[in-house]
Amino acid sequence: MRIAIGIEYDGTAYNGWQRQRTGIGVQQRLEESIAHVADEAVDITCAGRTDTGVHASGQVGHFDTSADRTDRGWLLGINSNLPDDVNVSWVRRVSDDFHARYSATARSYRYVILNRLVRSALSRNRAWWVHQPLDDKLMHEAAQALVGEHDFSAFRAAGCQASRPFREITRISVTRDGDRVVLEVTANAFLQHMVRNITGTLAAIGRGDEEPGWIHEVLESRDRTRGGIAAPPHGLTLVSVTYPEGFL
């Protein structure tokens, strides 16, 4: 039996999604909790691995089990064994051809920048504090150069293990809500640190350090050293994963 679950977590205390030899990954916490309910060991696969400190409100995973529980039983049982910073929001039985990662057609991320003179004690783990004024309209204008399928080598981490650097961004926007500048981006898939590197590059444009056209030059260079800094992980959240209608 294959079970799909929706997952949210505050990534502050975790070394990313994946189980670790040293430190704790979100995957380990979930597998331990599910095993209590299933009374057997399980392996869980997610739609997209997140890095240390990155959060999720719409992560999706699946696991196989021989245990027979109701959806409500799975949901309440798993959550009762999880710490407060990890939560399962829904549970559904799915067909065996569903795969949380390979069946997904798109992922959406949100990056939040706190843009004001003073830092925030309450947002310290959920937003990147940038005290210099940012022009969100210039950032949005520049970001549109990334829409479409491109070689995103200039925005991938040096240790990224993806076999191909091509990804397709279908939507990207930068908006302001008071003292928060919010980047939202949807793509078929993402390279390691891709959103954080895009955010850091756009922030340089928003500060006035670079012109909007600079991001196109960075993209075309395929050279990570040509772009801006990597924005810190704690401002990033995986907000949703899209699947064909027949699955979810």
Image (tube, grey):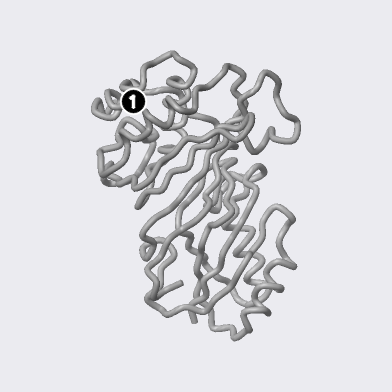
**Foreground residue among 161 and 165:** 165
In the current view of this chain or complex, which residue is farthest to the bottom?
A: 68
Q: Give coordinates of residue 54: x percent, y percent.
A: 57, 43
Q: Is residue 157 left or right of residue 5?
A: left
In the current view of this chain or complex, which residue is farthest to the top?
A: 209
Q: Give coordinates of residue 80: x percent, y percent.
A: 74, 68
For image coordinates 34% across by 45% down, the residue present is: 169
For image coordinates 40% across by 72% down, the residue present is: 98
**Foreground residue among 177 and 227:** 177
Q: Give coordinates of residue 26: x percent, y percent.
A: 60, 54
In terms of image quadrants, where is residue 146?
Answer: top left
Looking at the image, residue 32 lies above or below residue 113: below
Q: Mark 1 points at which residue?
A: 215
User: Disc 1 marks which amino acid?
Assistant: Ile
For image coordinates 66% across by 73% down, the residue present is: 75
Q: Give coordinates of residue 126: x percent, y percent.
A: 64, 38
Q: Is residue 17 left or right of residue 72?
A: left
Q: Kindly state the secondary structure of the residue where label 1 is placed.
A: helix
**Foreground residue among 63 and 169:** 169
Looking at the image, residue 180 lies above or below residue 133: below
Q: Count the marks.
A: 1
Looking at the image, residue 14 lies above or below residue 2: above
- What crowding class fits label 1: few (fewer than 14 Cα within 10 Å), some (14-19), or many (20 or more)? many
Looking at the image, residue 94 lies above or below residue 186: below
